[in-house]
């Protein structure tokens, strides 16, 4: 952990004691490019998302790389007794709705706090489990790039693959046997947003930055899967799908 992340480590250690052994039993995590996750300072880490179990794998991977795994979480969760307290105590970040001026202001505050405290945050740019039937990254949302652009914070793409063998997308049962499924975690170079800095309020800029991010995540995933992604990224709106909630709801 960085010095700034040691101020309130006890709850993270408690969570690690509970979560790390379970994930380690289920997943044999292999890292590619682990040196690309900053050891100090703020970062926004953006992984692909295709299983309800993969946040635990991502959290353990980040923990093993000696950074605190803080996520962006729904604002409503911060109002839940006990859970809300735990989210606040561990420095999780409430998701700001992108449609209001108040949300833009909140993003600026959150970004400054990440820089001030030298913290990283994990943001799923797809916003939910991918709708792509073959589990490729789908169209991204702007939350990750908003945070990165607002504070000139490194935006780190991550691809992870193999968790579907532990729990399929929208699966209801964890596959405990056989244990130690192979999971590969690939961390890429920061997405180059240098030409977009200072323009976080421009929708066209946000769209371009998000496209670059999703392209980077997909490029990391292709060699792991040993195949090329579809030329056109899956867009739920074009397939009559809701962009939030379960695919079968």
Image (spheres, rainbow, N blue to C red):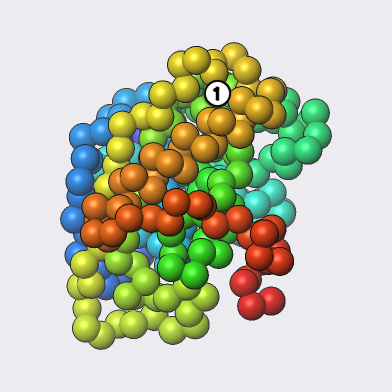
Q: Is residue 168 above or below residue 23?
A: below
Q: Residue at x 30, y 82 (%)?
A: 176
Q: Quadrant of residue 60?
A: bottom left
Residue labelled with disc 1: 149
Question: Is residue 157 positioned above or below 52 on the image?
Answer: above
Estimate the x, y position of residue 42 in percent, counting from the top left.
42, 27
Q: At 61% from the left edge and 25% from the top edge, which residue is drawn?
A: 205
Given residues 236 and 77, the one toward you in this image is 236
Neighbours of disc 1 within 10 Å: few (<14), some (14-19), many (20+): many
Which quadrant is the N terminus positioned in? Answer: top left
Decide: is 84 above or below 91: below
> Does any portion of residue 212 appear in the rendered image?
yes
Camera sees residue 244: no
Question: What is the x, y in percent for residue 248?
Answer: 64, 78
Q: Which secondary structure, mark 1? A: helix
Of residues 39 and 170, the one drawn nearer to the viewer in this rendering: 170
Q: Provide residue 15's location: percent of width, then percent of height.
A: 39, 57
Give the residue at x 38% y 55%.
229
| Residue at the farthest front position | 231
> What x and y, as percent, mark residue 40?
32, 26
Q: In the rendered view of the protein, which quadrant contains the C terminus? A: bottom right
Please tell me which residue lies in front, 231 or 160. 231
Q: How many marks?
A: 1
Q: Is residue 203 left or right of residue 21?
A: right
Is residue 161 rendered to the left or right of residue 79? left
The residue lying toward the viewer, choosing from 108 and 183, is: 183
At a point 39% along the width and 45% down the height, the residue shown is 217
Q: Quadrant of residue 235?
A: bottom right
Quadrant position of residue 104:
top right
């Amino acid at each position: 952990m960085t010095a700034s992340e040691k101020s309130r480590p006890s709850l993270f250690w408690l969570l690690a004691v509970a979560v790390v052994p379970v994930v380690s039993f289920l997943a044999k995590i292999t890292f590619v490019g682990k040196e690309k996750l900053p050891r100090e300072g703020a970062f926004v880490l953006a992984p692909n998302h295709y299983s309800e179990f993969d946040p635990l794998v991502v959290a353990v991977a980040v923990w093993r790389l000696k950074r605190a795994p803080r996520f962006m979480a729904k604002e409503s969760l911060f109002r839940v007794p006990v859970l809300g307290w735990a989210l606040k105590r561990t420095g999780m970040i409430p998701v700001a709705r992108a449609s209001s001026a108040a949300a833009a202001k909140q993003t600026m505050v959150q970004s400054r706090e990440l820089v001030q405290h030298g913290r990283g945050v994990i943001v799923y740019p797809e916003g939910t489990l991918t709708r792509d039937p073959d589990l490729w990254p789908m169209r991204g949302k702007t939350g990750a790039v908003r945070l990165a652009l607002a504070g000139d914070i490194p935006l780190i793409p991550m691809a992870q693959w193999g968790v579907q063998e532990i729990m399929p997308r929208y699966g209801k049962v964890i596959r405990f046997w056989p244990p130690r499924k192979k999971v590969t975690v690939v961390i890429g170079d920061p997405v180059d947003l240098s030409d977009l800095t200072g323009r976080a309020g421009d929708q066209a800029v946000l769209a371009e930055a998000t496209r670059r991010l999703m392209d980077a995540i997909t490029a990391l995933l292709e060699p792991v899967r040993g195949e090329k992604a579809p030329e056109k990224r899956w867009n739920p709106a074009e397939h009559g799908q809701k962009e939030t909630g379960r695919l079968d709801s």
